[in-house]
Amino acid sequence: MDDPEKLRALLDHAQDKIVVIDENGVYRYVNAAVERLLGYTTEEFVGTNTFEYMHPDDREDVREAFGRLLEGAVDDIETIEYRHQAKDGSWVWLESRVENHVDSTLGGYVVSSRDITDRKRAERRQRETEIRLEELAANTDDVLWTFSEDWSELLFVNDAFEDLWGMPVERVKADPTSFLDGIHPDDRDRVLEAMHQLSNGTPRTMEYRVNPEKGYRRWVWVQARPVAENGSVARIVGFARDVTDRRRRERQLQVMDNLLRHNLRNDMNVILGHAELARKRADGTVVEGMETILETGWKLLETAEKEREIVDVLVGVGDVGRVDLASTLRDKIEEFGAEMAPEATITADTPASAEVVSLPEIDRAIHELLENAIRHADGPPDIEAELHVESEDVILNVRDNASPIPRNEFEPLFGDEEPSDLYHGTGLGLWLVYWIVDLSEGTLDFEYVPDCGNCVTVRLPRAE
């Protein structure tokens, strides 16, 4: 276009700010967009230095970029983002492009700039959101995760995964489906089916067991949903929450409910039945009936007292701490030998000290184990207690000379099967032991050796 006036009019209608500056940054030409973007008139701008309008934090970066252009260190065009002060004192983000050669006609370097303030604000809001999400992910106990739609790529997982699953985060990042190895074998098929449904667009909520290091005793509640883009699943997002304590409480309540519905009701029926017979007969059999009433009544009172102890443990669960199991065991053996069961023979093999991490009530569990062994002995009680320390655990073995402990006394508290209506659970003492040990992150095992007796093994975390 040869007509300078038409060219000027055309430039003045451009949306971008177009200027010509010399090698010192002085404006030689400014189009009318400067007033629309920054509030200055063209007359106010021409003859001033561009660096005077730049934010102090950006000025040196722009000077360096312009210097590289002057030295020919940059090919073709230099692009830079910075804040430019408007006439009202506010700051406007500009993206400027400068060609690396002087236009001989215009007598300077041509710079075109466009307003990117809205984009910068959006980027800042996005970054602030990302920071908040990063803080949330780093400070929550929930596992937050995102997978690709076919589960072949792990897009995000926070560090909570390692503690809950018992697997390094690096492993699942390298092999996304390796998280399945941390799921209980009996639950994996259900999880695989849920993954298939999620990939097909169906949200899923489920619970399953994880963490092989802890014997898959961690329960997680998982909510996951597919994220669709352009009508198809693009990725899967979800979280996993540790609900082990909730599952434990539910199981405990089921057992206690079973106890109340069966034991107390049945024992009271025996009491009432014999009382009615005694009232009707009013002869010599009254004595026998009353003896049965008394025996059953005492059993009922004992059951109620044991139930109260269990409820106290479950309701008043405190923090675990350091306990010297060796000293506790010796004290309990001395207590039984001197006062409670002098007829019992109790031998112990213990180190001088064996500190564990457990609930303070662990002494009550030891008391219960010794009392059960004495009460159910076939003949004079003969009990052996052995305590030994391993690298990570302390193990207590209590052996007796009693008949086998009925498996239905403890099986409902191992695994996750529901108590049946036929299960009355007369062995409340063993339940008390189990819950104290379980709440101490320990394990409890039972074994019967013919002609020898029962061996109850308690394994507790060793204190560092």
Image (cartoon, grey):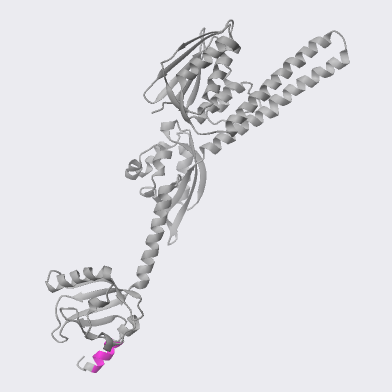
Asked if the magenta segment contains residue 7, the reply would be: yes
Q: Nearer the viewer, residue 458 or 173?
A: 458
Residue 22 in which image quadrant: bottom left
Residue 246 in which image quadrant: top right
Q: How many marks?
A: 0
Residue depicted at 28% across the width and 81% down the height: 17
**Residue 140 location, x and y as percent?**
45, 47
Q: Tell me where the magenta segment starts and ends, as one range.
A: 5-12
**Residue 98 location, x and y as percent?**
20, 75
**Does 58 appear above or below 441?**
below
Q: Nearer the viewer, residue 181 or 218?
A: 218
Residue depicted at 47% across the width and 16% down the height: 397
* Residue 75 visible, this angle: no
Q: Nearer the viewer, residue 410 or 320?
A: 320
Q: Is residue 80 left or right of residue 223?
A: left
- The majority secondary structure of the magenta stretch comes to helix
Q: Quadrant of the N terminus?
A: bottom left
Q: Quadrant of the C terminus?
A: top left
Asked if the magenta segment contains residue 278, the reply would be: no
**Residue 187 location, x and y as percent?**
48, 36
Residue depicted at 36% across the width and 70% down the height: 119
Residue 63 in which image quadrant: bottom left
**Does 382 appear above or below 7?**
above
